[in-house]
Amino acid sequence: MASPFALIRSTALVAAVLSLLLAFTALLPFAGTATAQDASPEAVETAAPDLPEITITVREGSYSINLPVPVLPGQYLVTVVNETDALAVADLVALPEDVAFGDLSSVLFESFKGTGGELPEWWATANFGGGSWAAGGATSQSVANLPAGRWTVFSTSPATTQPAQNFTVVTEEEAIAAGYLAPPEEGATPEATPVEFEFPILDSAAQLEIADAGITATGGASGPALWQVTNAGEQPHDLVVYQVTEGTDDAGAAAIATAVAAGEVPADAELVASIGILMPGSTGYIVGDLAPGTYAVFSTIPDASGGLQSDAGVITILVVE
């Protein structure tokens, strides 16, 4: 017969083992939680195409541009991250050779105050490549077609104070000469850079065509979608899409357009998609995610004939189901 002391020791040992098992079991839920937290979050559905990305961060008084190296001619997903509380825009332009950087600054200061103003002759011939607007604290995306050249990021909104910034899109030959790309293998014949770069047409769920006196929308349903935007007019145009209250009429949409052109945040309206200024005959793409509802779609910039383009008819009300 075992002694009482031996029984006590045996009981204590069993209790110790049980305590360890209970402690280990208690840790298991926490281990499971840690694994779940470390797992990658579910991908958010988006219509953004798989393209090299240019990220433009808008801060108080500055732009910060994150670029691939090198930036070759092609299509780019342009992401605008607005870290300010104000309405912000990052437009893209390749200025004509005889136009100085100060010429752009002058026209922005004199003619972009929300009421329209005189535009210089070179404005109609500049290569505007798009860009995007973003509400305070928001992020927006668009697709730009960028040929080789010196590009400028600038703002047309009176509410922003970011000085324009430059970056360069280089040809393949320039990238090789600068050491960014390896030279072709010995004996291989390098391909000649075409005079005009051909940009592919992306698959899009809807089309928006801008004329000098109107906007035509084709297709488009709620949800993530890539919207093709074509400037079919004779002057540069941009386009913003604001979700508005149901029943908003032409006068209400016009009031929103006037407020946005002045850099103001309109009441009862939310910026949901946009594309920066496009040159005549060019195409860009809006990466959108529209909920069912009513939208005011309009241009924000001055018209060549005076006033705002929205006053000249570059505005429409769109119902998305």
Image (cartoon, rainbow, N blue to C red):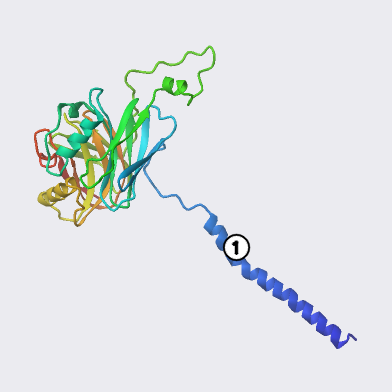
Does residue 90 show up?
A: yes
Numbered label tally: 1
State the quadrant of the N terminus: bottom right
Q: Is residue 80 left or right of residue 256?
A: right
Tell me which corner region of the image, top left, top right, bottom left or bottom right, holds residue 155.
top left
- At horizontal 23% and vertical 46% (from top left) the residue drawn is 241
Comparing 306 with 12, the one in front is: 306
Q: Residue furthest top?
A: 187
Tell me which corner region of the image, top left, top right, bottom left or bottom right, holds residue 102.
top left
Question: Residue 104 placed where, x, y %?
Answer: 22, 33
Comparing 114 with 223, the one in front is: 114
Q: In what element is the residue under mark 1? A: helix
Q: Residue furthest front?
A: 102
Question: Residue 106 placed where, x, y %?
Answer: 19, 35
Name which residue type carries label 1. Ala
Q: Dot 1: few (<14), some (14–19), or many (≥20) neighbours within 10 Å?
A: few
Question: Residue 78 placed where, x, y %?
Answer: 35, 39
Q: Is residue 107 left or right of residue 94?
A: left
Does residue 231 show up?
A: no
Question: Residue 96 placed where, x, y %?
Answer: 24, 24
Q: Is residue 47 left or right of residue 220?
A: right
Against 9, is 124 above or below? above
Q: Which residue is mark 1?
A: 31
Q: Residue furthest right?
A: 1
